[in-house]
Image: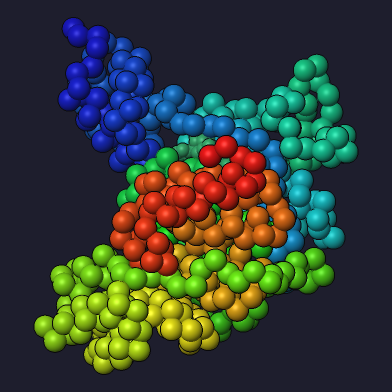
Amino acid sequence: MNLDPTSTQVAQFRDLIVERLGLQFDETKLGNLARVLALHAGGDSAAFIARLAAAPAPCEALHRLAVDLTVTETYFYRNIEQIRAFAEVALPACWQAREGLPVRVLSAGCASGEEPYTLAITAREAGPLGAGSVEIRAVDANPAMLAKAARARYSAWSLREVSPAMRARWFSGEGELYALNDSVRRSVRFDQRNLAQDDDELWAPGSYDIVFCRNVLMYFSPAQAQAAVARIAGALAPGGYLFMGHAETLRGLSHDFHLCHTHATFYYRRKLYAGQAPLPADFNQPPWNGVQTRPVLFDDPAWVDVIARAAQRIDTLAVAAPRAGAMPSAPAQADLHHALTCLHNEQFEQSLALIDKLPQQHADDPDVLLLKAISLSQSGALATAQNVCHQLLARDELNAGAQYVLALCHEEGGDSGAALAHYRSAAYLDPGFALARLHIGLLERRMGDAEAARRDLAQALILLQHEEASRLLLFGGGFPRSALVGLCRAELAALGAAP
Ligand SMILES: C[S@@+](CC[C@H](N)C(=O)[O-])C[C@H]1O[C@@H](n2cnc3c(N)ncnc32)[C@H](O)[C@@H]1O
């Protein structure tokens, strides 16, 4: 009997774990996976893998594996901006929509309970309607975490973001630990459930008004994350809210949601089902007008006066037309290619004329719309460029490029506040978007927020060194990578930060 699993067995085990729990392990984690396999297999990895593969989806062995394979870091009031958005936007909107019925909240991947208990406390603190106005359900695949959640005893470290006053209101000391108030504890229903599996009861259509699924899908394979988001979308009432982790986006995962941006954070709102009355136009506007920052105007013109010269991606579209069903005819390809060349040569009118000549089905392609928006903004037609961006966002609401071009237009127009909001949307939707991060840092510096500027410029510097050449060409305002890196370093040096 061989105690150490072979590399083939570890690979089989990895595939089974992606299939059963959604969790994806890259090459650097294989050593850990091999240790877990050896521990659970008790000396016969082949037999263990065969038993696991043959077992029904929820089985004891899988539950035990979840204890050792999941990342369970959490704490009360994690990402407090989202908790504020929950209290000040999502809850009031849902209370109104539910017309007196309790608002139904799901914490999916709740770990040891800090997240759903935070929501329960927040609802009590925020709500004029009392404890019965919210029903909170919390699920996780890890039984050890659920047992800890049921005990509701927490360390000071778990409460590190909780103010002393809140601590006094909702917890009582028990030796080294803090015991959560009993009525809050009882108000959350915990269940062992697997987000990577179909589950008719958990995902019954329209079951929830607000779902928190934070810092869970980042550990899933893309396919499993996409499937989990589709389940959440089906189970959310139309107009309901989804909160993900601050480093997680739905870009590339779903088209079922609108992006919301308030309280310096991002979250999503479930689109309406076909045939329903639309959401009010201002659904994404904060209801607390008084505290919105006013745009700041600067004498110094915006750094960016042009955006793009060329796009390898659009070039590819022009030459190879990779999108199924959108294969441009030979003349359309030639026109697109020509339009790109004109953009290269700063002949914006010619470029726009060529794009406008394209047959309708290609003219509506998101990449072509982006090329058009860039050409328009470069030619100074800012209002039309913004219209095209909105057209593009109507087709692909999570398009980071459209957010970026909108930001440039606002910056050109002197509205730094709006520009910053759109740059932040672009950087959130695409965390690797170096130029969006660079602009955020530059604007923050001009607005006098040196600490934030240092942080964002330092991040931009790292991202710029890895940014795809095609995106630098498209969005880099004609500046090569070396110039952008140099600018970033100079700005950091001026801020007293050693780049
Ligand atoms: C990092 S914690 C996040 C906790 C909390 N949502 C937060 O943001 O603070 C991730 C949790 O997701 C759970 N999880 C991972 N895969 C899961 C699955 N397939 N089904 C249900 N829960 C899962 C883990 O057990 C873990 O408790």
Q: Residue at x 53, y 39 (%)?
A: 499
Q: Residue at x 77, y 37 (%)?
A: 162
Left or right: 90 with respect to 109? right
Pick the residue in front: 309 or 50: 309
Q: Residue at x 27, y 88 (%)?
A: 354
Q: Quadrant of residue 39?
A: top left
From what the image shows, is residue 103 above or below residue 165? below
Residue 451 in view here: yes
Q: Quadrant of the N terminus?
A: top left
Left or right: 317 with respect to 252? left
Which residue of the protein is positioned furthest toward the top in this rendering?
1
Place of residue 249 in the rendered image (x, y in percent of width and height, measured from the top left): 48, 55
Place of residue 247 in the rendered image (x, y in percent of width and height, measured from the top left): 51, 48
From what the image shows, is residue 9 above or below residue 118? above
Place of residue 334 in the rendered image (x, y in percent of width and height, measured from the top left): 16, 82
The number of numbered badges drawn on the structure is 0
Residue 388 in view here: no
Pick the residue in front: 70 or 332: 332
Q: Quadrant of residue 355?
A: bottom left
